[in-house]
Image (cartoon, rainbow, N blue to C red):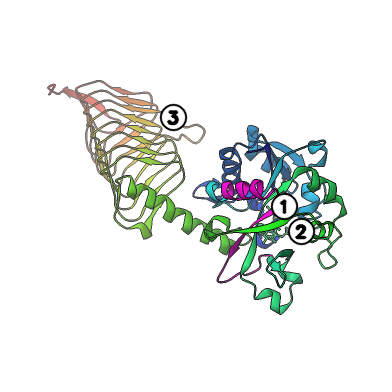
């Protein structure tokens, strides 16, 4: 592939979203939409990636971090103006510029790879990724002449009733010849209705100049879904969730009820683990093999479960590491906690990890037994094989020694237990 650089448009306000948060930072499966588009650029080996920011520029820039170069669009004058802001970065540029929108979280790297290849093969000035939709909604329409040649993109607002019937839409992903793009980008006329400069108008401009333009269709329309409204966001979430769950199942995880199981991005679950209904697993969580999770369980970020762990109904684990064979079957909470292998966390017991100012750590050893309704006020340590009696409160800073029994409020050590 020839030299590839990428521009991701992410300056827009997202007016239709009616949100205080920039649209591209709304999450799908726990991750901001924009980051998925950055993933695609990276997967394609983009030599340099620019993200055009404007509305809430600092926030968006922070989410991007070191992953791309930030370019600021001072006034939001449309998608062509957003691309034009990068012009200085492309002085003497050769090769291909891939332009994507930051609001397409389901964009698939293979679909974009196909586009880049088709662009290179045709030696085109511009290749637009299109899709055929049953309900083309408010997307721009791909306009072809009588011989089927692609000649323009018409925005929904400007389309005639006939043009609105066209099922082939512009996905907002394009490849350009860098030199020709920046040679023409300043010549796009303002759209008289919206008073914005539309990148889509470059197609007609190129046609007039005799440059080669083409639209190549993908049959994976979901990959190009642009989230313009909260309704689109919910649809993207549902599609992404289905994809994640199917992947888990194909890896050997039983998902008893996919309709009520929520697993965010970057979660790993070992084979033969069973996820019972109404369970939410947040991004980055690691679950081992042969575990049993739910029903009605929540695993929050920073959680790592080893193999053969059982987390039952109305149980929550957050920022905690849980050893092999641990049972925590009902109504419990572990936060900022390490639990050693084969311990039992009794019904209704909780770690009180937050003192109103900071989060404190709890360490529970191996084969410990935390009785029903016990409260461990962190920071606190419970040793290997120790027993904390039902209803006890182990107060902060206390250490229940290994193989001892502590009971009461505040809990006191009353005897030793035999090592097993
Ligand atoms: C755009 C296309 C439309 C296509 C659709 C695909 C134009 C004129 N229309 O419409 O043909 O079907 O995408 O999803 O391009 N942005 C900026 N600066 C601006 C304006 C927008 O960076 O001044 C960014 C937005 O943050 C967004 C992207 O460009 O990520 C697209 O803008 P948006 O307003 O969502 O365009 P659509 O109406 O969806
Ligand atoms: Ca959009």
Res 137 → quadrant: bottom right
Helix, strand or loop at label 2? It is helix
Find residue 69 and report its horizontal and vertical position in percent. 71, 35
Which marked residue is nearer to the observer: mark 2 or mark 3?
2
176 w.r.t. 132: above or below: above
Q: Is residue 206 magenta?
A: no
Helix, strand or loop at label 3? It is loop
Q: Earlier in the sequence, mark 2 or mark 3?
A: 2
Ligand 1 contact, mark 1 (Cβ < 8 Å):
no
Name the residue carrying label 3.
360
Report how far apart the C-alphas of labels 1 and 2 lie in the structure.
8 Å
Q: Is residue 139 left or right of residue 106?
A: right
Quarter that holds the N terminus: top right
Report how far apart the C-alphas of labels 2 and 3 lie in the structure.
59 Å
Q: Which residues are magenta?
A: 112-140
Res 393 → quadrant: top left
Which residue is at the front of the view, 180 or 158?
180
Name the residue carrying label 2.
203
Report how far apart the C-alphas of labels 3 and 1 lie in the structure.
56 Å
Which residue is at the front of the view, 69 or 28?
69
167 w.r.t. 400: above or below: below
Q: Residue at x 71, y 73 (%)?
A: 146
- Ligand 2 placement by image quarter: bottom right
């Amino acid at each position: 592939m020839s030299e590839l650089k990428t521009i991701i448009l992410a300056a827009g306000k997202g007016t239709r979203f009616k949100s205080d948060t920039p649209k591209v930072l709304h999450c799908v499966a726990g991750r901001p939409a924009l980051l998925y588009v950055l993933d695609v650029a990276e997967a394609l080996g983009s030599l340099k990636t620019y993200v055009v920011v404007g509305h809430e520029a600092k926030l968006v820039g922070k989410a991007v971090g070191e992953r791309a170069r930030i370019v600021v669009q001072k006034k939001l004058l449309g998608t062509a103006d957003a691309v034009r802001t990068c012009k200085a970065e492309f002085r003497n540029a050769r090769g291909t510029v891939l332009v994507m929108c930051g609001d397409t979280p389901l964009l698939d790297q293979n679909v974009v790879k196909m586009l880049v290849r088709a662009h290179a093969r045709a030696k085109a000035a511009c290749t637009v990724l299109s899709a055929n939709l049953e309900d083309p909604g408010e997307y721009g329409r791909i306009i072809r002449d009588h011989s089927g040649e692609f000649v323009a993109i018409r925005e929904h607002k400007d389309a005639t009733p006939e043009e609105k019937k066209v099922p082939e839409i512009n996905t907002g992903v394009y490849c350009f010849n860098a030199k020709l793009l920046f040679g023409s980008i300043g010549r796009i006329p303002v759209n008289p209705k919206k008073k914005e400069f539309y990148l889509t108008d470059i197609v007609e401009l190129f046609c007039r100049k005799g440059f080669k333009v083409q639209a190549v269709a993908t049959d994976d329309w979901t990959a190009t879904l642009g989230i313009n409204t909260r309704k689109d966001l919910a649809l993207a979430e549902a599609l992404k969730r289905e994809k994640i769950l199917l992947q888990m199942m194909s890896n050997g995880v039983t998902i008893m009820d996919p309709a009520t199981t929520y697993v965010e991005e970057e979660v790993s679950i070992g084979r033969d683990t069973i996820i019972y209904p109404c369970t939410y697993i947040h991004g980055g969580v690691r679950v081992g093999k042969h575990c049993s999770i739910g029903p009605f369980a929540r695993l929050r970020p920073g959680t790592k479960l080893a193999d053969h762990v059982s987390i039952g109904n109305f149980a929550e684990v957050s920022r905690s590491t849980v050893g092999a064979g641990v049972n925590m079957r009902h109504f419990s909470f572990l936060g900022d906690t390490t639990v050693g292998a084969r311990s039992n966390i009794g019904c209704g017991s909780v770690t009180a990890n937050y003192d109103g100012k900071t989060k404190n750590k709890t360490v529970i050893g191996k084969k410990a037994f935390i009785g029903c309704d016990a409260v461990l006020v962190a920071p606190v340590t419970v040793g290997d094989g120790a027993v904390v009696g039902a209803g006890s409160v182990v107060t902060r800073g206390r250490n229940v020694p290994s193989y001892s029994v502590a009971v009461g409020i505040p809990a006191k050590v009353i005897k030793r237990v035999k090592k097993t």
